[in-house]
Image (tube, rainbow, N blue to C red):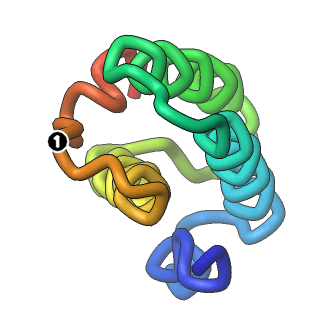
Amino acid sequence: MFEDLLLPMFDDDYYPDILVAEVKQIIKQFAKKLAKPDLSEVEIYRFAAETVVFINKMKPQFEDLDSSLDDTAADYVAEAMMMVVQDKGYMDIEMEELVSNREW
């Protein structure tokens, strides 16, 4: 499943592969947190918010490489996080809520 995460960003030359790979690693860490059994929605959203904080901190790095975490990137990240959540069996999670604290 992780092989497919953020493929559109990797395929788009606008996004630096090195930074997309870092975002992917952050999302993998999010997946590890979701491996705990019987998480509540509150816990899932809290883990998601923590994940987005790490990605928010990468915004200057993208800008330094003439890129950005734009609306398209936000969609890709949200979709990747949603894939992880659904893979773990949590189907009632709202995608927009997963990335509600994004600063990009």
Q: Residues within 10 Å of mark 1 (few under 14, many from 20)?
A: few
Residue 86 x, y percent position in the rendering: 35, 59
The C terminus appears in which quarter of the rendering? Answer: top left
The N terminus appears in which quarter of the rendering? Answer: bottom right
Q: Is residue 25 left or right of residue 3?
A: right
Residue under the point 69% across and 31% down: 58
Residue under the point 65% across and 45% down: 35
Residue under the point 47% across and 42% down: 69
Residue under the point 77% across and 63% down: 21
Q: So how many labels did they put on this image? A: 1
Residue 59, compared with residue 49, is above or below; it is below
Residue 91, compared with residue 61, is above or below; it is below
In depth, the one of 90 and 56 nearer the eye is: 90
Q: Judging from the image, what secondary structure is the residue with disc 1 in?
A: loop
Q: Is residue 78 left or right of residue 50?
A: left
Q: Is residue 98 visible?
A: yes
Residue 37 x, y percent position in the rendering: 58, 37
Q: Is residue 34 left or right of residue 41?
A: right
**Amino acid type, callout 1:** Asp
Q: Quadrant of residue 56?
A: top right
Q: Is residue 65 visible?
A: no
Q: Is residue 62 left or right of residue 39?
A: right
Residue 48, compared with residue 37, is above or below; it is above
In depth, the one of 66 and 69 nearer the eye is: 69
Q: Mark 1 sits on what residue?
A: 92
Q: Quadrant of residue 26?
A: top right
Q: Residue furthest front?
A: 38
Residue 80 x, y percent position in the rendering: 44, 60
